[in-house]
Image (tube, rainbow, N blue to C red):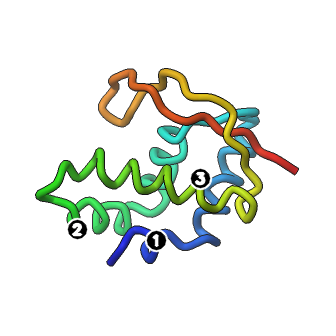
């Protein structure tokens, strides 16, 4: 299963809405990934397993961020900047930040 097939637009919209409901004016790709993994654990693990021999976390997270970038209009989000953010391993790495658009 390819990541574009695994990521359902409706599910992704719900995750973004959950981030919005947390009163976050902006969110990072890391924030999205953490929330997505929490709400859709099985799909997230399946995506990681698909890339188990090729840096699974880095590969899957990059593809998830690319999915967000390719669907900004449908998701009503907009890129704002790249800066440091805590990843799922507790390390600060540079990542894309997003803002909810109207």
Give the mark nearest the N terminus, 2 or 3: 2
Q: Name the residue under label 3.
A: 69
Residue nearer the viewer, 4 or 85:
4
Q: Which residue is drawn at 82% across and 47% down?
A: 101
Horizontal and vertical percent position of residue 39: 49, 59
Give the mark nearest the N terminus, 2 or 1: 1
Q: Distance between the residues labelled 2 and 3?
A: 22 Å
Q: Is residue 63 above or below residue 96?
A: below
Q: Which residue is drawn at 59% across and 53% down?
A: 69
Say what secondary structure mark 1 lies in. helix
Q: In this view, does 84 lie above or below 32?
A: above
Q: Residue at x 28, y 48 (%)?
A: 57
Disc 1 residue crowd, few under 14, some 14–19, many 20+, Cα 10 Å: few
Q: Which residue is drawn at 74% across and 45% down?
A: 21
Q: In this view, does 18 lie above or below 24?
A: below
State which quadrant residue 40 falls in: bottom left
With 86 as the anchor, is 49 left or right in this view?
left
Q: How far apart are marks 1 and 3 (CA)?
A: 12 Å
Q: Mark 2 points at which residue?
A: 50
Horizontal and vertical percent position of residue 83: 53, 23
Q: Of discs 2 and 3, which sits in the foreground?
A: 3
Which residue is farthest left? Answer: 53
Q: Mark 1 points at which residue?
A: 4
Q: Are marks 2 and 3 in contact (CB under 8 Å)?
A: no
Say what secondary structure mark 3 lies in. helix
Quarter of the N terminus within the rendering: bottom left
Disc 3 residue crowd, few under 14, some 14–19, many 20+, Cα 10 Å: some
Say what secondary structure mark 2 lies in. helix
Disc 2 residue crowd, few under 14, some 14–19, many 20+, Cα 10 Å: some
What label sits on residue 15 in the rendered view?
Answer: none
């Amino acid at each position: 299963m390819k990541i574009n097939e695994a990521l359902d637009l409706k599910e992704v919209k719900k995750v973004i809405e959950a981030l919005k409901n947390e009163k976050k004016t902006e969110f990072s790709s890391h924030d999205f990934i953490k929330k997505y993994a929490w709400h859709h654990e099985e799909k997230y693990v399946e995506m990681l397993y698909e890339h188990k021999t090729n840096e699974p976390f880095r590969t899957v997270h990059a593809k998830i961020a690319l999915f967000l970038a390719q669907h900004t209009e449908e998701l009503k989000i907009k890129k704002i900047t790249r800066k440091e953010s805590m990843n799922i391993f507790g390390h600060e790495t540079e990542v894309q930040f997003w803002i909810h658009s109207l």
